[in-house]
Amino acid sequence: MRIGIDVGSTTIKYVVLNENNNIIHKSYERHLSQITEKTLGVLKTVRELTGETKALLSISGSAGMGISEACGIPLVQEVFASRIALKHLLPDTDVAIELGGEDAKILFVTGGMEFRMNGSCAGGTGAFIDQMATLLNISPTEMNEAAKTAERRYTIASRCGVFAKTDIQPLLNQGARTSDVSSSIFYAVVNQTIAGLAQGRPIKGNVVYLGGPLTFFSELRRAFDDTLKLKGVCPENSLYYVAIGAALGADTEIDLDKAIDTLSSLKAVGNYNSIDPLFSSKEEYEEFVQRHSENTIERINPDTYEGEAYYGVDSGSTTIKMVVITPDGKILRDKYSSNKGNPVPQVKEFLEHFYWKYPKIKIVGATSTGYGEELIKNAFSLDSGIVETTAHLTAARKFMPDVEFVIDIGGQDIKCFKIGKKGEVDSIFLNEACSSGCGSFLQTFAEALGKPIAEFARLGLFADKPVDLGSRCTVFMNSSVKQAQKDGASIENISAGLSISVVKNALYKVIRASSPDELGKKIVVQGGTFLNDAVLRAFEQEMGVEVVRPAIAGLMGAYGAALYASRHSTGSSSILNAQQLASFFHQVKDARCGLCSNNCRLTVNIFDNGRKFISGNRCDRPITHRKADDSLNIYDYKLKLLKEYTPVPGERGKIGIPMGLNMFELLPFWHTLFTKLGFEVVTSPLSNRKMYLLGQATIPSDTVCFPAKLMHGHIQTLINDGVQTIFYPCLSYNFDEKKGDNHYNCPVVAYYPEVIQANMPDVEKVDFIKDYLGIHRPKDFPKKFQQVMSKYFDIIPLDEVKVAAAAAYAEYNSYLARVRARGEEIIEEARSKGMHIIVLSGRPYHIDPEINHGIDRIISGCGAAIISEDVVSNRVEKFPVKVLNQWTYHSRLYSAAKYVLTQPDMNLVQLVSFGCGIDAITTDEVRSILEGGGKIYTQIKIDEITNLGAVKIRLRSLFAAIEE
Amino acid sequence: MAELKYTKDGRLLFTKEMRKEYKILVPNMLPVHFKLFEKVLQKAGYDIEVLTNSSHRVVEEGLKYVHNDTCYPALLVIGQMIDALNSGQYDVNKTALMITQTGGGCRASNYIHLLRKALKSAGYEKVPVISVNMSGLESNPGFSITPSLIMQFVSGIVYGDMLMLLNNQVKAYELNKGESEALVNSWVERLLEQFSHGKGMLGEDFRNNLKLIADEFDAIPVKRVPKVKVGVVGEIYVKYSPLANNRLEEFLASQDCEVMVPGLMGFALFKMDNRLDDIVLYGGSSIKYKFVSFLKGFCTKMETAMLDALKEHPNFTVPSPYAHLRSLVGGVIGYGSKMGEGWLLTAEMLELCESGYENIVCTQPFGCLPNHINGKGMIGKIRKVFPHSNITPIDYDPSATKVNQENRIKLMLAVARENLNERMTRESAEKTGKTTSVTTESAAESI
């Protein structure tokens, strides 16, 4: 008899095989993190069912490792176990794809055996699908059903689960259909698996699907089939392959009774890193509760109140909050609930009930805020909408008029900001893609352990040895918790540890504070997550200050909106009345804008009486049908300028240049050089999503920045277009602009051609010129260039090269000069019109609309003029910075920041590509230069997908602060 | 008490007076090597101490004071120093810190600046930081790298590499557990003793020592049975520092593997070569070329001395000389790829495959920029050259958990064991003249 037990991240599976290796018993169930108990249960069941005392037994799975170590049952690594089972059951398999609770694996069995598991930063797995279903407020099975009727597909980030969540939320808030979102989620999982694991190896032949998600969700299989263009098989027992492999791979006979004894007596020793408890005594806790109970807002019984009132609604990412207040700010009614994926019905219900129940109260002002601000405002015809930061600040001042810092931890977001000297919102911090340990994070764990979040958080209050979980994102935290459980941490100590880590995330990942002095002493905390005493206590402990938590911490956005409504009321409100509500109608439709090359997907919300609200667009064009005004946008100008470098047929041949990374700035140089030498220069077209997907399967490192990943698509496009010679040289050094201590390119820009050459199979079909060149040494360049070219073409006379090179250097300079001249014109024109000027800074390749997601247009939509960092970077002398200033592009950032300090009507916004290691250094320095001169620093992180909702919050807050 | 002096850019200098009064703290990377470096510097008149603090407070402090997206080594190195300053063991008014700076295009050249920022936030602004570099980046009146120091460092590198290499090759097979480790410690003591008398660093002493080391390690009783051989490569700090790589070597040993970690000398030679390659690729000064060539010649000679000592012992796998590593990457990646570990990382993986260590853990800090290119970016291509290569890239950062990392390493090891079993079966079949495969260890294989 053979037994295999597979203890995965969420489930436990076992099989018992007879002498002929046929399955005689099997089972599959969730283990709810009770790993030891459940394993023990399995052993006892098997012992009982078979009556055998000895068996060849081994254990497998990510959570099986700990058990194996603890009680000496041999381990078969899980991927290897699958392979053993495949060899036995499906020997014709070429590739197997296995998705588990938290792992994704691909096994290339034939043509060079190779097994891959997702790296530590990857979440598109079973747990991810569960999370997404929770977000949609349906069960995973319902999600699969819903996906069957999908009509359109949204792009959802496929890198990290947490990140995908932030893509889905705005879609839901904008009213996207559940079926479409469900289907899109499955496709995101597919893209995640392919991009993260295939790494250039084609998936073809006999493909087998294994593991829970692929077994249970037909639509997920269909998405794989569709994307891979093949028909994969999900075999019988697809849930048990790891367990079967473990059974087949077992080579040690185990005495079952002994194993049961060992496991029963297994006492975890509590050997883990722990931190100080939250409270040392009940008294301490009571004093704490007493202190915080003082910050309340008076409530008035609405049954007895007559007169005017104001309505505020905060349509958040997962929740909706509403309040009605009296003119003196007292609360009449409030509601805090999950938005169940669609906030509109919730608002309707609330208002209907309110009108019916309290006919004597008249709403004379109504304001919305939050992610769903626009939707709600349009749907119910509210008077105004305000940016979240303003709403929260307004509310916070009610409790602490001289507040210096506001921190809000909600379900999905952390939002915090400092209040500047003039009382303006300053230094906004929002959690970015990879640091989102917020409320939903506690909730996920509470649910995994089968407890409501409030109860779960409370468990930690008196924990004696909270687990030190550090600060990290949810995906990582799962495995940390698993490790802590393995080390014997109690649920109380894990709960306390999680609350503390939420706080640490906010402080060290989002705000990156190192001392309370940085934030100020006057702190107001809010957001639903702070309603948990454990989180609040952890925050005070970590920062060493006492803070104010309003009793309505979860309602502050809505309360602030209501206060705003009361202050800006004209005496009556346009909000839909009871009669209008009765005929309220809301329908969601999809459309493509098609008015410009962005071709945005639009979500059209249709209301009664032909009222409409369109979302999903980057600009106002589909609403106003006026062409966006790009006249004062240098990003647009640069793109147009690059289009002027068109192919000129030449006798020496044709050269293809991929339009990515540094080519955005060096095209004028290379184009002139080659054209002068008699080569026709063709470029790959402007990036788009399809092009990215074309190259996605050949990306070897899933954590490299998106601009680099896009390069694969550009190269593939050139090859598909029949270009025979592609020129994409390695450049350690960039031009020396004499603003820094050196003039490097970053390692990725410098050497990405090496990655392309090593990982894109089709490159072998063409001449790929990736040689190292030194454009920073104009004197040596012609000779070196001549040598390189002689490897691919007949030798070009040096004189000719020298002439062409001189022209190339001149053209590069003239390109820069034209950009700067246009920049100057924009500045002058903006000044003549009294417009604000935004120095939208980043790298040359950030002008690619696929990379910047049209953020430049959003800024022009706010009525500001846009110039780039290179327009002004030459206007300041070289100056010392507090970092090693050794990269050409990055030196421009420091110079631009320095220049902005001298210009009252200029502000700097820095675009940062996710995964850009160098920007970890530049952002802090740019911030410190700007803040040192009293300017606001605004950073926008962008990736494959960007949550434009968050971007708008930042930009609107910036403009709100500038206005003040 | 030494006066605080600043450059005109506002950088706090390490003055000559400080050299007399101050203790200098250095973060640890390679336990054996750094002990020898410590002695070399003490001998030169500096009150040096290599830090050994490694509790989780190191990570905590790092997270607190360093931008969390910065690479893990920066976080650890800075965390280790701040933790030391916080410990109360040192008079912070008489303590300086020392850190290396390569001056390359990688983020690592910025550690010193991040350290200063961190010191400022932590309230240690008056602690001077000394940069150790060969690029003329920052100078201090109280510290200078003399040619003599360089030569002594180089011999420290060779000894360190030699002891690490032999320990790894013997430890996995020794009959009496701990004997090899004890010999390492005894040699460190003996070398420190010699160093403190100004001996053992060069010439005849040096060669004799190397010979003696090899002899003594070879004399340790061993039982050589076939074991999975694993190479460890990667970003230099994570690859070497047990603090950064969650005690990777210990873990591999616990999985019954023989480990090979390429030495530090390759990296030193690589960094010198970069300067030469720059001149070849882009043009440049011939005086500089000559100077660097001379230094490279010296290091190569030292390297040869070590390899010669090893060649006398057929029981040991002798690593390839640097020149061979360089030749291996021809056609795989360009010599211009020099940031971070650059092409050397690719070369080390190729060399390991070539010398029977085709199972490789490629370690890097999460988001390491050069390793996108030279590590993860080249694994596919290495596979084309060595189809049996079995490489697993592992990311390290404060968030990565040991469980996750070990699970991936175990997968690599499972494949390695299967390959090893197959090879043994094949070899024994060849020996006995049988053509069909017989039994393997795993029951599954016989089904």
Image (cartoon, rainbow, N blue to C red):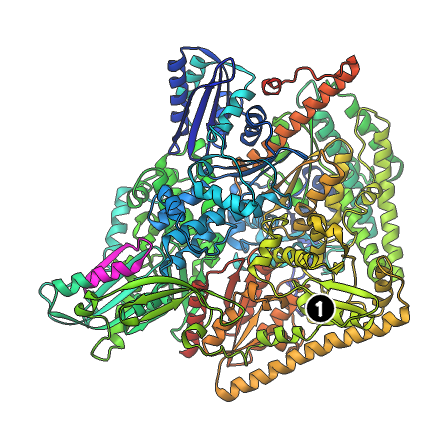
Q: Is residue B353 magenta?
A: no
Residue B217 appears anywhere in the view: yes
In the displayed structure image, the side of residue A909 where residue B129 appears, left or right? right
Q: Quadrant of residue A560?
A: bottom left
Residue most extreme to the left: A304
Nearer-the-camera pick, A902 or B16:
A902
**Residue type, numbered disc 1:** Leu
Q: Which of the chains bears the disc numbered 1?
A: A
> Is A638 left or right of A450, judged from the image as shown?
right
The C terminus of chain A: image quadrant: bottom left
Residue B339 percent across, percent down from the top left:
72, 54
What's drawn in magenta, residue-wise? A331-351
The residue nearer to you, when weighing A419 against B358, is B358
Is residue B15 depicted above or below A564 in this figure?
Answer: above
Residue drawn at point x = 59 percent, y = 26 percent? A87
Residue A757 percent coordinates (x, y): 72, 51
Mark 1 sits on what residue?
Answer: A666
The vertical placement of A52 against A30, above or below, is: above
Q: Relative to A49, is B324 on the left or the right?
A: right
